[in-house]
Image (tube, rainbow, N blue to C red):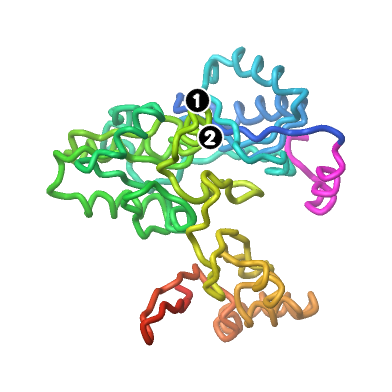
C-alpha cells in the first residue's frame, strides 16, 4: 500500500499522542529523474519505514520536499539520503519554530514540475541561474541602496513577512510573480537584483528567466528565508527580514523577529495568523484574529458561516446545484484582500473578494 487510507481525524489524533518529538525539514533538488512514478514509489517505501510525514513532489526535473521526521529517525534518514545518488549531500533546511506537528501523513505526488511556474522550460536555459549568495552576504548587500531586493513569493506570503525595502509583487501565483517582476524592472537590466523566496527553489527558476530576459546582475538567497533566519539567529544579528515566514504546512508560518506586520482581514487589528475558511466548500486562505475566529466561527464571512451551519445533506444539495446556488450564496471566493482607505484622517480597512 503506497498511499494513506486512514481518515484525517484519526491521523491527527494519532499525531497528537505520539510519545516522541518530530523535526520539520525541507529540501529540493533539480536533478533528472527518468521515471518519476517508479522513483515516487521507491522513496515512499523507504521513508514510510521511518514514520515520516510530509508533502513531496516528484517530476522529471527533480524533487521538492517538506516533511516531519521523528527525532529518533533523523540520523537514519540522513544516511538514507546520502545513499541515494540523486539526493546525496542535498542541503537540508530545518524549521526554526517547530513543534513537530507540521504534517500528519505522508503524501508523495508525481507532478509535471516540482514548482508550478507556467513557463516553457524549453524556451530558455533553466540551468543559467543567478549567483547564489550565502545568507550573510545577502544580509550585507540588503543595506546597499543601489541594489533591488525582490520577493518572489505570492501576496499572502509577503503580507505577513518580508525583507525591508523589498519589492513584493501583488501576485496570486509564482507565474504571476515572474511576469510582474520582469515588467516592473524592464529597462533596468543593469541593476543589481537580489531575489529571495521561502527555501530558494522558486528563485532558481526566476533567476534563470530574468537572465534570459537580459538582466545581467541577478543574485539569489541560497537556502531562502529559512536559511537566512537560521544564520542570523546563530550570529546574533538584527534581521533584515521582518514578520513571519509563511510555510506550506500545518503551521502556516514561523516568526523570524517576533514582529506582527499584517492585519486581520475582518476587523483590521494586528494579526498574522493565516487560516482556511471553515466552510470546506470555500476553504479560502485568509488572516483571522482570535476574536474574529470566535465571531465568524472560523469562516471568512457571514455567508460561509451560515452555510457551514447547514446540515450535510443541504450542503450536498448546494454542491449539486453549484453553478446557480453557489453564485447566489457567494460561497466561492478566490481571495480576500485588504484595501487601505482614508477617512476622517484615520486609517480604515475595507475588504473585498476577488
Front residue of 136 and 65: 136
Residue 312 in which image quadrant: bottom right
Residue span colored magenta = 1-18
Residue 33 is marked as 1
How many marks the image carries: the answer is 2
On the image, the x and y values in percent for residue 306 come to 70, 82
Residue 101 is marked as none
State whether residue 68 appears in this view. yes
Q: Name the residue beneath numbered marker 2.
A: 64
Mark 1 or mark 2: whose residue is earlier in sequence = 1
On the image, the x and y values in percent for residue 264 come to 55, 68
- At horizontal 36% and vertical 60% (from top left) the residue drawn is 170
Marks 1 and 2: which is nearer the front? Answer: 2
Residue density around tag 1, few if under 14, some if 14–19, many if 20 or more, within 10 Å: some
Front residue of 235 and 193: 235
Residue 259, above or below 310: above
On the image, the x and y values in percent for residue 175 come to 37, 51
For the residues marked 1 and 2, what is the alpha-carbon distance in whole angstroms? 13 Å
Mark 1: secondary structure: loop
Mark 2: secondary structure: strand
Residue 196 in which image quadrant: top left
Q: Please tell me whether residue 9 belongs to the stretch shown in magenta.
A: yes
Q: Is residue 152 left or right of residue 86?
A: left
Amino acid at each position: 500500500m503506497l498511499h494513506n487510507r486512514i481518515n484525517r481525524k484519526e491521523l491527527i489524533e494519532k499525531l497528537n499522542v505520539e510519545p516522541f518529538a518530530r523535526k520539520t525539514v525541507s529540501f529540493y533538488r533539480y536533478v533528472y529523474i527518468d521515471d518519476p512514478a517508479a522513483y515516487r514509489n521507491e522513496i515512499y517505501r523507504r521513508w514510510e519505514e521511518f514514520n515520516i510525514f510530509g508533502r513531496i513532489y516528484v517530476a522529471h526535473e527533480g524533487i521538492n520536499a517538506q516533511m516531519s521526521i521523528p527525532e529518533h529517525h533523523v540520523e537514519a534518514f540522513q544516511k538514507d539520503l546520502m545513499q541515494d545518488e540523486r539526493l546525496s549531500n542535498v542541503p537540508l533546511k530545518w524549521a526554526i519554530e517547530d513543534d513537530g506537528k507540521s504534517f500528519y501523513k505522508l503524501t508523495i505526488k508525481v507532478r509535471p514540475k516540482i514548482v508550478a511556474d507556467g513557463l516553457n522550460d524549453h524556451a530558455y536555459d533553466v540551468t543559467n541561474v543567478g549567483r547564489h549568495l550565502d545568507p550573510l552576504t545577502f544580509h550585507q548587500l540588503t543595506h546597499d541602496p543601489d541594489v533591488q531586493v525582490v520577493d518572489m513569493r505570492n501576496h499572502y506570503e509577503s503580507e505577513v513577512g518580508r525583507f525591508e525595502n523589498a519589492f513584493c509583487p501583488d501576485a496570486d501565483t509564482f507565474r504571476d510573480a515572474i511576469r510582474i517582476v520582469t515588467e516592473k524592472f524592464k529597462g533596468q537590466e543593469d541593476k543589481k537584483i537580489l531575489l529571495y523566496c521561502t527555501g530558494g527553489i522558486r528563485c532558481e527558476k526566476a533567476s534563470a528567466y530574468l537572465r534570459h530576459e537580459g538582466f545581467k546582475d541577478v543574485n539569489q538567497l541560497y537556502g531562502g528565508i529559512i536559511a537566512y533566519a537560521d544564520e542570523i539567529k546563530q550570529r546574533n544579528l538584527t534581521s533584515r527580514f521582518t514578520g513571519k515566514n509563511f510555510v506550506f504546512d500545518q503551521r502556516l508560518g514561523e516568526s523570524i523577529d517576533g514582529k506582527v506586520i499584517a492585519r486581520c482581514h475582518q476587523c483590521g487589528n494586528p494579526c498574522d495568523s493565516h487560516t482556511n475558511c471553515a466552510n470546506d466548500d470555500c476553504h479560502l486562505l485568509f488572516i483571522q484574529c482570535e476574536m474574529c475566529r470566535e465571531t465568524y466561527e472560523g469562516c471568512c464571512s457571514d455567508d460561509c458561516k451560515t452555510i457551514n451551519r447547514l446540515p450535510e445533506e443541504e450542503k450536498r444539495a448546494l454542491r449539486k446545484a453549484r453553478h446557480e446556488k453557489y453564485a447566489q450564496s457567494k460561497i466561492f471566493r478566490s481571495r480576500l484582500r485588504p484595501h487601505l482607505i482614508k477617512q476622517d484622517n484615520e486609517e480604515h480597512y475595507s475588504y473585498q473578494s476577488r
